[in-house]
Image (cartoon, rainbow, N blue to C red):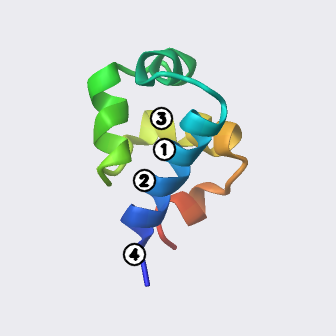
Amino acid sequence: MLGADSLRAHKIYSYRLSNGMTQAEFAQMCNASNEVVAGWEKGVMPEEEHLKKLSEILETPIEKLIGR
C-alpha cells in the first residue's frame, strides 16, 4: 500500500499529465517553480502556501494531501 507522500505525488503527476500540462504550466498554475513541482511529484511535501491551491486544483481536501 502506498503512503500519503506517494499517493499525493501520484495524484499531482496524474492530474498534470491527464490535462496535457508540462511541469512549467502546472507550476505557473500553482504559483510555484518547475523545481518545486518536480519535488512534489517525487513525494516532497508542498509548503503550506501551496497546499490550499493544490487542494482546489486537485479537488482533494488538504487533510488528505498531507496524509491525515
Q: Secondary structure at mark 1?
A: helix
Density class for disc 2 (Cα within 10 Å; few <14, some 14-19, many ≥20) is many
| Amino acid type of the residue tagged 2 in the rendering | Ala
Does the CB distance between marks 1 and 4 fall below 8 Å? no
Residue that label 2 marks: 9
Quadrant containing the N terminus is bottom left
Image point (45%, 33%), residue name: 49
State the mark number for residue 5: none
- Residue 30 % position (x, y): 52, 24
Identify the amino acid type marked 4: Gly
41 over 60 or under it: above or below: above
Query: What's the distance in space between the residues labelled 1 and 3, CA to CA?
Result: 15 Å
Residue 46 position by quadrant: top left
CA distance for labels 2 and 3: 14 Å
Which of labels 3 and 4 is toward the front?
4
Residue sitting at x 42%, y 77%: 2
Task: Report the residue marked by disc 1.
Answer: 13
User: How far is mark 1 from mark 2, CA to CA?
Assistant: 6 Å
SS at mark 4 in the image: loop
**Distance from Cα at disc 2 to Cα at disc 4:** 10 Å
Q: Earlier in the sequence, mark 2 or mark 4?
A: 4
* Residue position marked by numbered label 4 in the rendering: 3
